Amino acid sequence: MSNDPLLQPYQLKHLTLRNRIIVTAHEPAYPQDGLPKERYRAYTVERAKGGVAMTMTAGSAAVSKDSPPVFNNLLAYKDEIVPWIREMTDAVHEEGAAIMIQLTHLGRRTRWDKGEWLPVVAPSHHREASHRAFPKKIEDWDIERIIKDFADAAERMKAGGMDGVELEAYGHLIDQFASPLTNELDGPYGGSLDNRMRFCFDVLKAIRARVGDDFILGVRYTADECLPGGTGKEEGLEISKRLKQSGLIDYLNVIRGHIDTDAGLTDVIPIQGMANSPHLDFAGEIRAATNFPTFHAAKIPDVATARHAIASGKVDMVGMTRAHMTDPHIVRKIIEKREEDIRPCVGANYCLDRIYQGGAAYCIHNAATGRELTMPHSIAKADRRKKVVIIGAGPAGLEAARVAGERGHEVVVFEAANDPGGQIRLTAQSERRREMISIIDWRMSQCEKLGVTFHFNSWAEADTVQAENPDVVIIATGGLPHTEVLSKGNELVVSAWDIISGDVKPGTNVLIFDDAGDHAGLQAAEFIAKAGSKVEIMTPDRSFAPEVMAMNLVPYMRSLQKLDVTFTVTYRLEAVEKSGNELVAHVGSDYGGIAKQRTFDQIVINHGTIPLDDLYFELKPASSNLGEVLHDQLIAGRPQTAWRNADGKFQLFRIGDAVAARNTHAAIYDALRLVKDI
């Protein structure tokens, strides 16, 4: 048996867990009709196949109809969920992993205009900032009903074969009762800590009465809200002890912080540029004080940190949840002594942020996550070896090279720059985005093992490519900044890329016109503001940087607000002209009726990219498919068979921003779903 602390089994009551790594409860928003159907099951089972000890499903399955999910969650109040749960639990158990589910009532952490349009309930009328609903103050009959709903839901989960259930307390209704900030009830459920904890214990008692003693129960709760007037560390420690002493639960899952604002949620679940494992020591304090099984997860992205968490005795089970979205086979690779092959989580938080914006979680650089029914995590060998030539070593080109290499093809990559990375190497110039470079480093390492040939500082011409006698050519040349967006004065502006790369020195009074709304605009603003300059970000949109999304916006705002950056929404930069040493900005509005003039010494445009596609169009006449992609075949996962030119010598494709300005995930997905069938 291995002496690796992470690979030691752990006895949780009657349940033997095969190692110390878990996937904590999270909702990837893959349910159909509130049920864990094929897609949800495939995603969950993949992590069990990868060797995790236990996977927890549902970032809180709803137990009541007046707890409507704000995005696509499981609905534990439905009787018809049971057979779907059974199919999933059976499949996970067959892979040797345990499986639990998290149950909740959201309380005020939802909206009244979701689901059945029922009033939101909470122990006070205080609105939660994130979801904006003003709740009804909960009544005695609401409490009785919801306690029964919890017990009913737990009974359904046991009938479905779950090993246990975890109650989601922090930020949700149970915590809203426990926190003095959100509980303004009188009588048995408000006032003293005894009374504020009563709802939690009543729920646990009702569940335990239904499911018996041979069923795991746990609570994920905050032991320190980090809010003035809220549950502090001392009271959180007392709550921890009372949970243990109740005899109703089998473990603690410790959180520190609050989630009622975007900023609070981001501190609980930190993103890239923020410290790793910021709450691990705190969880260790709770475990030491209670001497009770303790779980914890919060930005523990790497095996070394997870190993330390277990070896030092800080926790009994360590959660690596986003890390398993990036690579579901972490444990298997540890066992096989291939830790260097683990695809690294870069903390981009595309997974969590995109649930709210796009409706389903995806990993920024593993396009198979959430697409297990159609995309492979492990690439199969091709029937015939081909020569694949790729132009561009950004994320799209490197993913194409990696997948083609895994397929067993001979792969040659031409890259005009000194180094790989494309736009990722540019974005990684910002300290907060530095972790993004691991997307590139991991692929380069994998390509090296696969024998991919790279030619850097090589501007590929059509003759260069054809001299390789390729079977397949993939253009992944990306794009160049698009600044030609004004009616006049395009030659007077610079791009956000110019600022981030350091090619252009910041001015002293700068306007950033950002209608792409992505990271580049905010990164440029931060570079300029940190140089001591005055900065204004202007956008024609209702909100600035809409592509950055909520949790990624938090660190930018903390920095830019301190630097006194001005944000101006709903105005459009229309033209620029020179006046002496200054630039006059002509500003209008999509709403009409506005014509203003403003003066700056530098104007920066962030308007996405224009495809760098000259080589594609030069090669197109010599290709057998004339560049055509048959979408039905691409979507169905079949090889491309377009044949439009009998004299063509090779298939030609383009991917990523060489097609149109999109994002890193789109570029990598383009590459994976095309090349896996070449």
Image (cartoon, rainbow, N blue to C red):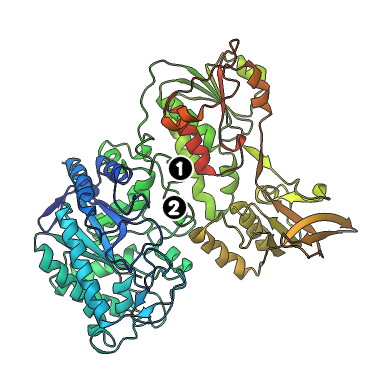
Is 490 positioned to the left or the right of 388 in the image?
right
Quadrant of the drawing holding the N terminus: top left
Residue 251, can we see it? Answer: no
Q: Nearer the viewer, residue 71 or 513?
A: 71
Q: Quadrant of residue 663?
A: top right
Q: Which mark is residue 512?
A: none
Residue found at x 32% / y 65%: 281
Residue 106 at x, y percent in the picture: 34, 68
Residue 662 at x, y percent in the picture: 57, 43
Quadrant of the drawing holding the C terminus: top left
Q: Which mark is residue 365?
A: 1
Would you call the spot at circle 1 few (<14 residues within 10 Å), some (14-19), or many (20 or more)? many
Is 79 positioned to the left or the right of 507 in the image?
left
Mark 1 secondary-structure assignment:
loop
**Kind of residue at disc 2:** Gly
Residue 233's place in the image compared with 451, above or below, is below
Q: Nearer the viewer, residue 524 or 112?
A: 112
Label whose residue precedes the other's in the sequence (1 or 2): 2
Residue 23 at x, y percent in the picture: 29, 52
Is 61 positioned to the left or the right of 136 in the image?
left
Look at discs 1 and 2 and give the one toward the viewer.
2
Residue indicated by mark 2:
359
Would you call the spot at circle 2 few (<14 residues within 10 Å), some (14-19), or many (20 or more)? some
Q: Quadrant of residue 291?
A: bottom left
Residue 643's place in the image compared with 132, above or below, is above
Gap between marks 1 and 2 measured at Cα: 18 Å
**Kind of residue at disc 1:** His
Mark 2 secondary-structure assignment:
loop
